[in-house]
Image (cartoon, helix red, strand yellow):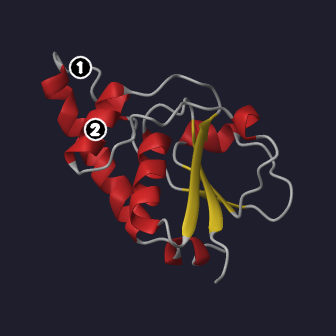
Amino acid sequence: MHPRATILFLCTGNSCRSQMAEGLCRHFKDRELEAFSAGIERHGLNPLAVEVMGEIGIDISAQQSKTLNDLAGHSFDYVVTVCDHARESCPLFPGESKVIHRSFADPPSLAAAAGSDEEALPHYRRVRDELKEFILALPAELLAVP
């Protein structure tokens, strides 16, 4: 059996997009990929991200918000920046890490004008579903990037 490739999903605060990507990858691609997530900063786990992931049967409530410093010593085959800020701030990774950028909208920003959680949830669902589509295309999607 071949060892699984390691993948890090990186965003600004490791509260929403990268957390959802990690949960989706662990759920759908655990046999092929060992998933991690981190942020440039630590903002805590977003409760609406937890809620919309739970709607599709994926519990990310035990995941913790991390920074790259928390993952010091880990090496990654792939690093996927899921927001433009992370891409601009992404450090150089030692070794053979292949850095790939796929920008996804920030659900809290999309939902900024929402008057309630119920009004905000469709924005979180949309980004969750876009991330799911990306994750389901892995690892072929990663190998296609030069």
**Of residues 49 and 93, which is closer to you in this image?**
49
Q: Quadrant of residue 13?
A: top right
Q: Quadrant of residue 10?
A: top right
Q: In this view, does 114 lie to the left or right of 88?
A: left
Q: From the image, tell me which residue sits under label 1.
A: 113
**Of residues 52 and 87, which is closer to you in this image?**
52
Q: In this view, does 28 lie to the left or right of 86?
A: left
Residue type highlighted by circle 2: Tyr
Cα distance, mark 1 to mark 2? 13 Å
**Of residues 70 and 99, which is closer to you in this image?**
70
Position of residue 9 relative to residue 34, above or below, is above
CB under 8 Å between discs 1 and 2: no
Name the quadrant of the N terminus.
Answer: bottom right
Position of residue 67 relative to residue 117, above or below, is below
Local crowd at mark 1 within 10 Å, few (<14), some, or many (≥20)? few
Q: Position of residue 130 (x, y in %)?
A: 33, 55
Q: From the image, tell me which residue sits under label 2.
A: 124
The residue shown at (59%, 36%) is 85
Position of residue 74 relative to residue 49, above or below, is below
The residue shown at (49%, 43%) is 18
The residue shown at (79%, 40%) is 72
Q: Is residue 110 left or right of residue 69?
A: left
Q: How many marks?
A: 2
The residue shown at (53%, 34%) is 14
Q: Where is residue 42 in the image (x, y as percent from the top left)?
A: 59, 24
Q: Where is residue 108 in the image (x, y as percent from the top left)?
A: 35, 27
Element type at marker 1? loop
Q: Residue furthest top?
A: 115
Q: Where is residue 141 in the image (x, y as percent from the top left)?
A: 51, 73
Residue type highlighted by circle 1: Ala
